[in-house]
């Protein structure tokens, strides 16, 4: 990519897109096209076609997606498959029609089977049954991989698919109904600490910045107690308990979002679709690339680490009546390592960074 190349980042305000935009700016790129969801509905085929016709981007990074944790994925199943398929179909097809030089499509490691051999490598795709709770989202992302792969093989496009592991970092989603486990735990413990200390100023500022089910900083204490209790921040007999779904035994891998962004730009600058598979293969498949650390941690250990960093003094309660999800999800990043990139931020340092960011941006 040239420093003055026109780069369209779809989803530039989210966790992934904002990290990529920040990385590109730091490297001296300056010609960006960004549109908010209100300015451009990527589910609207006509609007997307018009956008590409008018803007004619040289490079496209497709980081826009409907995402969420286990509750959201299982509850809004139709929304997850419909919206993600529509976004992908429209953007990828227009990249082909308008001869975009390179597209980077971002998915997720939830594309792999529920009982996938660990660590998960790219060749495990479509070898077994998916995890039920996020099956619609995973199928949409698998379709995106196959769409990029198919356009490359039929039309000679240069579309690369990357599958990051669980990400966290600045601009993460801290909405307790829809967030992933790490940001949810950070916010729960932050609010739990304030509740334990009777620090209503912190609680009200937090809720003013990001209300929970419409309960903001102006709500009564009883309303705030009720909504915190509903989301697992519970005071019982003058003791505070923080509910965490499942046994705490599942193992998860986490990647600092700015490391992920660095990997994406490395691939955009240095690698092509033809680098993503063995040239001697009779069948070209599984050309996507895992982005991860290859290191995992139990949810219980993650919670203890966050507890120490936040300074939460209350109890942790693992609700074993709630689902665990997949017991182990660890990527094999050896393909990416072979292409020349490795992560640099370890988990504890990353949690400290993201908690500092959250504290600075939640009105405290």
Image (spheres, helix red, strand yellow):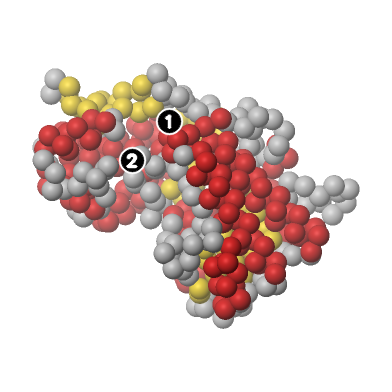
Q: Position of residue 68 (x, y in %)?
A: 45, 43
Q: Where is residue 349 in the image (x, y as percent from the top left)?
A: 39, 47
The residue singled out by tag 1 in the image is: 299
Number of marks in the image?
A: 2
Instruction: Name the one closer to the observer, 88 or 233.
Output: 88
The residue singled out by tag 2 in the image is: 176
**Could you tell me which residue is drawn at 41 percent across and 23 percent down?**
322
Query: Which residue is farthest bottom?
Result: 4
Secondary element under disc 1, as helix, strand or loop, is helix
**Could you tell me which residue is drawn at 14 percent across and 20 percent down?**
237
Q: Around disc 2, counting alpha carbons within 10 Å, would you say few (fewer than 14), some (14 to 19), or many (20 or more)?
A: many
Q: Position of residue 199 (x, y in %)?
A: 12, 41
Which quadrant of the view contains residue 271?
bottom right
**Viewer-nearest of labels 1 and 2?**
2
* Relative side of 63 to 14, left or right: right
* Relative side of 62 to 158, left or right: left
Q: Position of residue 196 (x, y in %)?
A: 16, 33
Q: Is residue 262 above or below residue 240?
A: below
Q: Is residue 250 above or below residue 22?
A: above
Which quadrant of the view contains residue 170?
bottom left
């Amino acid at each position: 990519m040239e420093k003055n190349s026109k780069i369209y980042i779809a989803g530039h305000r989210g966790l992934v897109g904002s990290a990529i935009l920040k990385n590109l700016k730091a490297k001296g790129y300056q010609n960006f096209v960004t549109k908010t969801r209100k300015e451009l509905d990527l589910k609207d085929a006509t609007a997307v076609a018009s956008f590409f016709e008018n803007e004619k981007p040289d490079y496209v990074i497709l980081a826009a997606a409907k995402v969420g944790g286990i509750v959201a994925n299982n509850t809004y199943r139709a929304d997850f498959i419909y919206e993600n398929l529509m976004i992908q179909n429209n953007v990828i097809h227009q990249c082909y029609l308008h001869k975009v030089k390179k597209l980077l499509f971002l998915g997720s490691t939830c594309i792999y089977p529920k009982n996938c051999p660990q660590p998960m490598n790219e060749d495990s795709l479509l070898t077994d049954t998916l995890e039920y709770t996020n099956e619609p989202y995973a199928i949409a992302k698998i379709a995106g991989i196959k769409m990029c792969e198919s356009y490359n093989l039929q039309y000679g496009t240069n579309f690369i698919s990357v599958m990051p592991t669980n990400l966290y970092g600045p601009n993460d989603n801290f909405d307790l109904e829809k967030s992933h486990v790490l940001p949810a735990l950070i916010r729960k413990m932050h609010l739990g600490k304030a509740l334990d200390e009777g620090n209503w100023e912190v609680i009200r500022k937090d809720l003013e910045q990001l209300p929970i089910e419409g309960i903001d900083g102006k709500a009564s204490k009883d309303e705030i107690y009720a909504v915190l209790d509903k989301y697992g921040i519970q005071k019982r007999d003058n003791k505070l308990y923080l509910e965490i779904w499942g046994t705490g035994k599942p193992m998860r891998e986490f990647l600092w979002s700015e490391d992920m962004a660095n990997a994406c730009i490395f691939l955009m600058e240095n690698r092509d679709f033809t680098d993503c598979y063995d040239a001697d293969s009779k069948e070209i498949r599984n050309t996507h690339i895992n982005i991860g650390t290859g290191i995992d941690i139990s949810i219980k250990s993650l919670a203890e680490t966050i507890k120490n960093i936040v300074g939460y003094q209350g109890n942790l309660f693992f609700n074993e009546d709630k689902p665990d999800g997949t017991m182990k999800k660890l990527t094999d990043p050896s393909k990416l390592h072979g292409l020349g990139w490795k992560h640099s931020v370890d988990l504890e340092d990353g949690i400290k960074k993201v908690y500092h960011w959250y504290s600075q941006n939640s009105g405290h």
